[in-house]
Amino acid sequence: MTEAEAQSLRDDYLGRLDVAIADLPWRIANELRSGIEEELDGLDVAELQSRIVQLGDPVRIAAAAKEETGSAPPAPVVVVAPAPVPPAKPAMVDTKWFAIVGALVLGIGSFLFPIGGWVIGVALVTSSRFWRRGEKAVAILLPFAGWGLLYAAALVSKLIWVEAPADGGASNPLLPTAYDLAHSSLIAAIFFVPVGAAWLLWRLRGRETPRR
Amino acid sequence: MTGDVGAQMRKGVVEYCVLGLLARGPMYGWELAERLSAEGLIASIGTLYPLLSRLRQSGWVRTFERPSESGPVRRYYELTEGGVRQLAQFRTSWTPFARSVAGLIAEAPPTARASAEGEA
């Protein structure tokens, strides 16, 4: 067994292969032949005989290649990805600046436009989702609670410190009546409005998104 | 429907099996042929080269030459970026597809079979 014998085996097999693949498209025939040729290259006779058996009859190889050549090209896998959804722009009432404006209108507007400013401020604050309901209720009801406390305190003070005339005579007109106390405590209670608004602004710290 | 269901199934997946093998590293033709034959995916090396040619035309595989230990220069096949992407997409699609088919062709449980026979 010599190298010449191996070359003869190789040439014989490749010659039969060339005949068998003559009908194949040139590019495929060329790639097939080079692939098989490199497989046979460098083998000794024993290895060559074994490899030729493994490869099989050139006619069958050509037939398989011909059948495969007619197959459709591989279909690419198309994964339909959902279109990227642009981040939704938050509604105006869900922005932080809306909440800040609401708190400022509540706190300052009540002094500029005593009733209308407060109503608008309450509307803005209640529309915002940056605060919990409880927080909004505290800020809005604080002046009323303050009014009630001040009025109660004034009444108690009057009862304790201002004694009624012992003889049942007319009361001193210079002393405040219950109505006066209610009115005065209402005016004083207005100062609770900016306190509530300031508390709302303080609660906004660190909140960048509206609450669910 | 033709009788050779196995051949049709192999044709549908053999390209992606080649991509899967090449994803592990470059291989030469005979290596690929041996692996695919052992798995029953190709009957002959004659099937492999037209398939590799198509993969190259699709831009999923490219070749380069490297001397082998035994001497001759071999043509190696490796995945391109496009081939890597295709294989990834196929992997994503294959698992749910195989699960669906397995579910559909699974044997009906005995109770369902009995009721179907009763209705018949």
Image: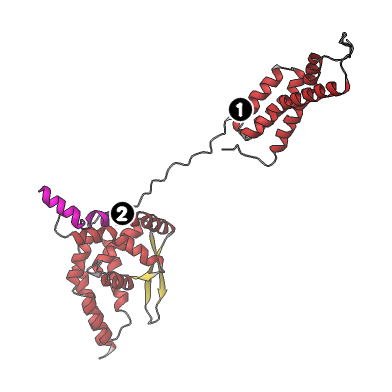
- Quick check: A115 above or below A80? above
User: Element under label 2?
Assistant: helix
Q: Residue furthest front?
A: A167
Question: Which residues, given as a range, are shown in magenta?
Answer: B97-120
- Across and down, in percent, residue A170 comes to 87, 8
User: Is residue A101 something that shows in the picture?
Assistant: no
Closer to us: A82 or A57? A82
Q: Is residue A194 magenta?
A: no
Farthest residue, direction left: B120
Per the model, the C-alpha gap separating discs 2 and 1 is 49 Å
Image height of B78 relative to A103, above or below: below
Task: Look at 64% across and 40% down and name the residue there.
Answer: A208
- Disc 1 target residue: A127
Q: Chain of mark 2?
A: B
Residue, x 29% and y 87% (percent of image)? A3
Tell me, yes or no, if residue A149 can be seen here.
yes
Kindly identify the amino acid type of the residue bearing the numbered disc 2.
Phe
Q: Residue A99: give its label.
A: none
Within 10 Å of the Cα at label 1, are there few (<14), some (14-19), or many (20+) other Cα atoms?
some
- Farthest residue to the bottom: give it: A1
Q: Are marks 2 and 1 on the same chain?
A: no
Q: Position of residue A201 (x, y in %)?
A: 72, 34
- Which disc number belongs to residue B97? 2
Residues B113 and A94: in front is B113
Task: Decide: is A34 above or below A139.
Answer: below
Q: Quadrant of residue A10?
A: bottom left
Label 1 resides on the chain identified as A
